[in-house]
Image (tube, rainbow, N blue to C red):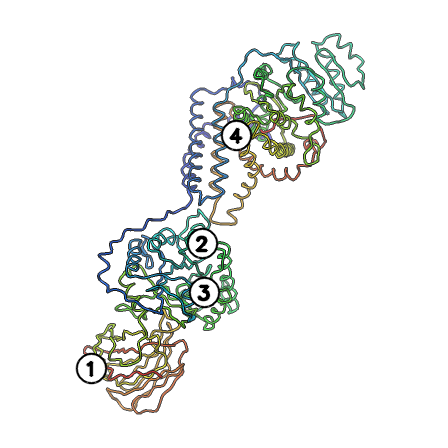
Amino acid sequence: MKVFRSHPDGLLAGDNPATPSGDSLKPPTPMRIATLGGVLAICVLIGGHVWIKLTHLPVTGVTALYTAAISTYVLSRFALAAFYRSPRDVGLEPTVAIVVPAYNEGPSIARTMLSCLTLDYPADKLEIVLVNDGSTDDTWEHMLSALSESAEIGAAAREATAAPPRKASVVQVGRVRCINFATNRGKRAAMAAGIRGTTAEILLFIDSDSAPAEGSLRKLVRGFADSKVGAISGLTHARNARTNLLTAMQATRYYVSFQLLKSAESVLGAVVCCSGCFAAYRRSAVEPLLESWENQRFLGVACTYGDDRALTNSLLRSGWITRFDCEAEAWTDVPERYGKFIRQQLRWKKSWAREGPILLTHIWRTRPRAFPSVLIATLAGMLSPLVLLYNALEPLRHPGTSPLIYLIGLYFVSVAYALLYRGLRSDGLWPYVILGTWFYVAFSAQLLWAIVRLKDGAWGTRGLVGSGLRKVPENA
Amino acid sequence: MTALLGVSIVLASLSLGSLWIKKSIPYDPKRASPPVVGLASVHTSSPPLEDYADVIPVINFHVVSTREGPYTVTPARFAEEMAVLASAGVHTVRLAQIEALIRGERVPLPSKPVMLTFDDGPVSDYTAIDPILAEHGFTAVGFLITGQIVGPGRPSYYLNTDELKALARSGRWEFGGHTSAQHRNATILGDSDPKPALINRLRLPNGTEETLDQWRQRVRVDLSASQVFFRRVLGYSATSFAFPFGASDGPTNDPAIPGQLDQLLKGAGYRIAFNAEDVEDAGPGSQAPAPVGVSAGESALRLPRFGAKAQTTSNEIIDGIRVMTRPPTPMNNLMKVEWTGYDATCQLDPGMGLRLRTGSYGTCVPQVNHKEWVNYRLEADITGVSPAATGIIAVRDGDTATNGNGGRIEVAIGESSFSVREQVGDLRRTLGDVPLDAQASSRHFVITVSGSRLTLQVDGLPLWAANIDPAIRAGNVTLAATVQGEGQEVALVKPKLSPL
């Protein structure tokens, strides 16, 4: 796994760096112009390819329509992302509650709590709600001891928690509230309890291993100045990008997905997944939906995975706008082993396969301008494993044909993503965008398995229902 | 390192970009607009085509393209040929009409009916031929090598299924089989020349010869594959067939094959079959028999055609139609018909008979429709026979089941012997060599052909008789001579031809 550490150019070499913000990695202007030119050239090329397909429609047939649809979608992402601007800061400073569900987190929950307490935000406007979802380990004890260690809370707190009530269900010290479930009730129940336990205007969802960058919380909430905005997603980076090939591919994939897909969706006012690792929701928007979200059932089975996507979807259905703020950055850990990665991918694909069709049932009226791209993304996404298989098997059936056109098309899309990455970020990881694109396309066939397993509620990464951990954003 | 990677990606992208665009343009050849034809220059050299009845000449083409090839007609020439046909008042007919005609049914035919067929199924059926046919309101029959028809967008010499469907939808085109994958010459045992795969037992990969059962199996599977194709793409089974290379009866290495192939064709649903892909009008120097049209009573699986090739002119096609539609000539005085010489001068001398002069080998052929010359008796004297000159009288010349290859019975009369041979296609067989007891330069002879029986009486000698190949069904009477040295003349004196 560590072979890439010895890369001669230093790719993946050395320890993971600190968490630099986007500005410090901004490439010089000539590089930005060059990569922009490259992206434009590839967009023109793809456009030309679509033009050829469409002008030869009687010959190219139904495959041309697929190509045209998927290419138009990709081109529209670049075009829309070009119009993306971060929400403006008008000095909004709402009350914020950080809701952290936890299941068998052990000592790391203490670190999460302490990092939340040090966030750059007025202390009287920030509270923290930790929910222990019936952990079988010592998570609850670590929560309580973190409370007493907190310098900020001081002696009074230490006294209050000196002999912690082991069975108490709620302990509040200062602006930290710890809620304990005697039994495991699932992540959604834990989050719902946390949400009900606060009156703050804004709910901040954050994974136990996520760490917002300096000043990110202030940036994340500024978009709520628009009263129609119900949720805002931040930009999550992989903290362990340089650990191995797998994490490097995931890291670049995250970045491109956020900067391209979420930016484009934000321009249309419908970011379809404000991911649980770093996103803020308006409490007044969430509250009326809480009951149905907590008890969501699909195909007769209680929904355990895909809570963030389901919540964003409910907000959109109620007519709220959702946005993305690329300057509100956070850092999280991504799976370092293929087994865990595959189980995570399966879970995401399952939630995508469930929420995608649900989204289609209302987006045409709740946000009509986002409808065409949601429709194409859903249909093409569903078809993509079949297209992959078709292109792999067709040369066997008809020896004259080659998947060359498909593969070259894929290559250009991957290079366009890599150029975008290179133009936005000088961290030397851009080659992994190309690798990662191919890697993820190869994984698209997993969707078929995900659809088969749609009714299976098992969490996947741990094999236990309702683990509180969500490592990374959806839609990455 | 990343800079190097970047540069190589930029370079790869530049080259892949053009490749991608080039590769993604599907093969979708455009239909050419019909070339403009100046008829004035063509039309005058051939006399007008007169009306004819109860016969349909079938004219076959292959590919229309500017590429060079013996069977490749240029678009300009094809357009001219169709314009000449149209201005001659020709109308095209459909498969159902030709089927009804050969069954002897009363079938309404347009004036000057012809059938146009196009073998193999090249893409030019769609790109070049159909627009020209459309201009004249002509219909066509395409005989497809179905295994060669490709899917849409694939580069191919042959049609793709979309083009094929478009032709079928136009209403102008009917389609028949030309095998799925047997339109090829393949190796047989004991012959270095490859032979038509459909009618030969081939050499198997292990070096042995295909058995008749294996041949039957191969052909049955192939014919069935074609019909599956037709049902899948056009929605119906084909009822007409064209033999690859026009070869129905030979050359074959198993005499059982032609008969069995007929059974297989019928079993696959084919009711009529055409041969003679490329029989041309017997022009000067040609040994090929004259083309014939299709008329009532024709053998349904051996329908004759006239092949138009790269060098065939519009006038030759009109002449071909004229030859194919000649009414059957009654068997009467051979001295009243026109004789044409091939490598010979043929002169009718009313007092004496037909005089043939040649340098080495030459033939005189009466210009008749001998379709109905089946059982007959020829009586004449032959003169001029010497050690340096042999006279050859042929009966039932030309009109055999194999059609394209011709067939005949030859009686060669020399100074001191006579010899009888039969020829079917390329196969020659000597039926007998008989010495004559006295030398003479003139002989009297009587030849009769009736069914598959030949009799011959020379001078006062006893009657000589032989059985002949039933494939030699009907045909002309011709005179030929082989001579050594100049100035030799062989003559057929007072020939009397009468039906039996």
Q: Is residue A448 above or below residue A425?
A: below
Name the residue tied to disc 4: A433
Q: Is residue B16 above or below residue A211?
A: below
Q: Nearer the viewer, mark 2 or mark 3?
A: 2
Q: CA distance from mark 4 to mark 3?
A: 57 Å
- Can you see residue B78? yes
The quarter in which the C terminus of chain A is drawn is top right
**Image side of residue A9 versus residue B291, left or right:** right
Query: Element at badge 3?
Result: helix
Name the residue tied to disc 1: B350
Dot placed on the residue nearer the N-terminal end, 2 or 1: 2
Dot placed on the residue nearer the N-terminal end, 3 or 1: 3
Indicate the chain on which mark 4 is placed.
Answer: A
Check if mark 2 and mark 1 are on a common chain: yes
Say which quarter of the image contains residue A205.
top right
Indicate the chain on which mark 2 is placed.
Answer: B
Give yes or no for contact between labels 4 and 2 (Cβ–Cβ under 8 Å).
no
Say which quarter of the image contains residue B368.
bottom left
Q: Nearer the viewer, mark 4 or mark 2?
A: 2
Q: Residues within 10 Å of mark 3 (few under 14, many from 20)?
A: many
Query: Element at badge 2?
Result: loop
Image x and y of residue A280, in percent: 62, 20
Indicate the chain on which mark 1 is placed.
Answer: B
Name the residue tied to disc 3: B198
Name the residue tied to disc 2: B149
Give yes or no for contact between labels 4 and 1 (Cβ–Cβ under 8 Å).
no
Check if mark 4 and mark 2 are on a common chain: no
Dot placed on the residue nearer the N-terminal end, 2 or 3: 2
